[in-house]
Image (cartoon, rainbow, N blue to C red):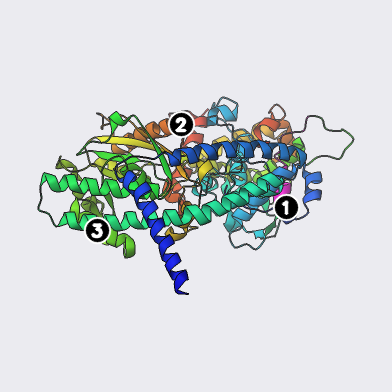
Amino acid sequence: MEDLWCVALGVFQLWLFVVVFFITLPAMFGLSLGVTGLYIQILVKILEWATLRIQRGRQEQPSVPVPLPNGIIERAGGSMAEEMGRPGCGRFAPSDALYFCKKGLESIADDQVTQRFSSEELASWNLLTRTNQNFCYISLRLTVIWVLGVLVRYCVLFPLRITLAAIGLSWLVIGTTVVGLLPESSVKNWLSELVHLTCYRICARGLSATIRYHNRENKPQKGGICVANHTTPIDVVILANDGCYAMVGQIHGGLMGVLQRSMVRSCPHVWFERSEMKDRHAVTSRLRAHVAAETKLPILIFPEGTCINNTSVMMFKKGSFEIGGTIYPVAIKYDPRFGDAFWNSGKYHMVSYLLRTMTSWAIVVNVWYLPPMTLQDGEDAAQFANRVKSAIARRGGLLDLAWDGGLKRGKVKDSFKEQQQKMYSSFILGQNGINNQ
Amino acid sequence: MGSSSSGMKDVPDAQELVQETGFSAAHLLRLHERFEFLDRDGTGELRPEDFDAIRELAMNPIGDRIIRAFFSAGKETLDFPSFVRILAHFRPADKNRDRAQQEPANSRTRKLRFAFQLYDQDGDGKISRAELLQVLRLMLEMQVTEEQLQCIAERAIQEADLDQDDAISFDEFKKSLEKVDIDHKMSIRFLK
């Protein structure tokens, strides 16, 4: 019995030694041993092989479903006038109702909004159990690789990632608390940045994250506001790997609360109580004060307000754009083949989400820094928000939707229906409204 | 759409539906997933409230009418075969249809019948002046005055009502739309 304990202890020590020296320390200094890169390359080869094999298998067995990542119908996309197919000229034709009828039926078959709140469908199977739709029965080799994948992910990668995450988070708490004890000085700021950076780097390794940053010359500067599309809480880790940001958000209880309270000791993040969040004015003035102090770190804000599934960008809430200051837009795009990064908060709690993420293949992500933007003359906050949103959508290859992410939980406002009615009436009656022929 | 591992075996009456509606097996599976998504409480049948989850439908001026059109007279629930049969009306016309076969679900007449139903709420086979006004009111609501509404309805009836009985029958409806490419205007293109 004691021998068993000794052996187990020895193995555990060896394990920790490997983890600390080969992963954690290099991660903290931003170095890499190249293992992750190799892993990703091998994975890509295997996934390509799997795709071809499935396609071949599909020809032989017609019962295998065909994936349709862009929905099941193709929409015409013309304007109301084009679709009506006739000039308006002040009269109503019975065929006009057909336009609304068709639009209504298209949305019953498949709608643009609800599909954004569930995970993106892949163009081919990525050998994960969770995206399996009877693919594993196509060929023996595929099944074997899938089983091997399950073993590797759950027995090798998962414990490794948990260890790294634990190390990273405890380092964050300890490090920031220690730094927080120092008096205010540039040394303190420098140390705080170091602690934050190293911690996030360890956490990123904890997710096998491969992050590619583009256009780093546009990186957000002090006194600015960084704005990005939101897919998952991990966005924060991804962005903070390359620079330090002041986070904005609500104070939570539990583990999150501990992290938040310790972080704010070493550098000024902006945490709000739940009651304060309701008061938009208070929020805006606090953020404005932060931005005005030009020496403070750039604020990180996700204007969509909720997690979207990374195929599109939804409406940006204009509050963030009323603060003033320079906006640094950032586009984040995850590669869905290696794991689904989207946090479906209705379906999964944070913990099960993290477990799922840690048992995926990896997180591969592209981050583009866009050139800074400011409010132009004659533009109001909402238009500015739309301009930034379009820029981000274009850069990240995402669909630019005007819908509000809040629709995840709420109902459609009547103003949308009125808009449709307005469009129709200006179509029949002309822009000036009254046409009594 | 999210991935689920339902197979064709979960789809009720799959074979018959494929034959009857002309949807491929893959499309049927997709529509079944959609049906299950809309069926929040998992009863296997849809109710009018379940359609409220579709945001784009909520902003459609005649959205409520379209929803009602799915539920045949008096029934408050919709099962999957009925759901699919109605959507089948909106498949684009098949190019190589065998003329001898009975009229398919997506024929021009069936499409027009569906559209006619949207106007003819009391189901008497005619669109009365009042019914036309109702539809116009839905599509224009606050954007025009009551007089303008009456005016537009008046013109529309005059143009379409050929036998002067102050209502539009199904045949008159068809006639007024004979130049319109119904197949284009009332088809939903399902992806292969």
Marks 2/3 in contact by CB < 8 Å: the verdict is no
Residue placed most toward the observer, B94 or A419 = B94
Q: Are marks 2 and 1 on the same chain?
A: no
Residue A295 part of the magenta segment? no
- Relative to A403, does residue A266 appear above or below in the rendering? below
Residue placed most toward the observer, A234 or B14 = A234
Res A434 label: 2
Residue type pointed to by label 3: Ile
Q: Secondary structure at mark 3?
A: helix
Res A174 label: 3
Outermost bottom residue: A1
Position of residue B52 in the picture relative to residue A383 (left or right): right
Position of residue B85 in the picture relative to residue A288 (left or right): right
Residue type pointed to by label 1: Ser
Residue B95 on image: x %, y %: 78, 29
Disc 1 marks which residue? B82
Residues drawn in magenta: B83-95
Position of residue A153 in the picture relative to residue A13 (left or right): right
